[in-house]
Amino acid sequence: MAPLNPRLAVYPGTFDPVTRGHVSLITRGLKIFDQVVFAIAHSTPKKTLFTLEERVEMAKEVFAHEPNIIVEPFDGLLIDYVARRGAGSVLRGLRAVSDFEYEFQMALMNRKLDREIQTVFLMTDFKWMYLSSTIVKEVAQHGGNVKGLVPRQVIERLRERYASLQDEE
């Protein structure tokens, strides 16, 4: 296998949908890495609102202006994907102490599976500490205003999805 690029990181997640917290974290990640792959997980224990294709499309729209952010889907073990991608690091965000235990366990397992790939944690910007895709979806589902919490490209998709779900009821 080719040597890993220490200036390339993978930022994995479900991103259902992309929030301003995700955008903030990856933008800050670009201050450390030359390129960051915004890797959208196909396999997830979470029930997603948007399909994998829709999540990838939204993220590509959000990051269209940033050539150093690569958006792509992935499946299987994260550490295998990172190695295939040739990235030297996994970028992860921490909002609160509650995130730390889970993320720490995942980082240790990934380290056991491949000692050459590092995990880099960034603390979220304080204004996004409470923000999650789950909270955004819940607010949007009940007609609440999510402006400022998600990129503009996501707002209309949330409105359309929840309107179509209400039409089905």
Image (cartoon, grey):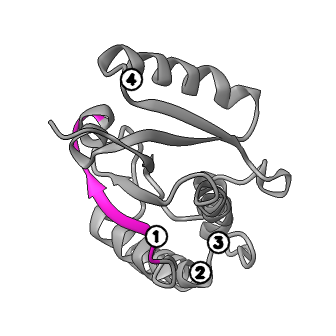
Residue furthest to the front in view is 3
What is the CA distance from the residue labelled 4 to the residue labelled 3? Answer: 30 Å
Residue 10 visible, this orientation: no
Q: Amino acid at mark 2?
A: Ile
Residue at image position (31%, 32%) is: 79
Label pair 2/3, CB-CB below 8 angstroms: yes
Q: In what quadrant of the picture does the C terminus appear? A: bottom left
Of mark 3 and mark 1, the one earlier in the sequence is: 1
Q: Amino acid at mark 1?
A: Asn
Label pair 2/1, CB-CB below 8 angstroms: no
Residue at image position (51%, 32%) is: 119
Residue on which the image places disc 3: 150
Of mark 4 and mark 3, the one earlier in the sequence is: 4
For marks 2 and 3, give the one nearer the viewer.
Answer: 3
What is the CA distance from the residue labelled 2 to the residue labelled 1? Answer: 24 Å
Residue on which the image places disc 2: 155
Residue on which the image places disc 4: 110
What is the CA distance from the residue labelled 2 to the residue labelled 3? Answer: 7 Å
Mark 4 Cα shell of 10 Å, populated few (<14), some (14-19), many (≥20) = many
Residue on which the image places disc 1: 68
Residue nearer the viewer, 86 or 15: 86
- Judged left or right of residue 92, residue 165 is left
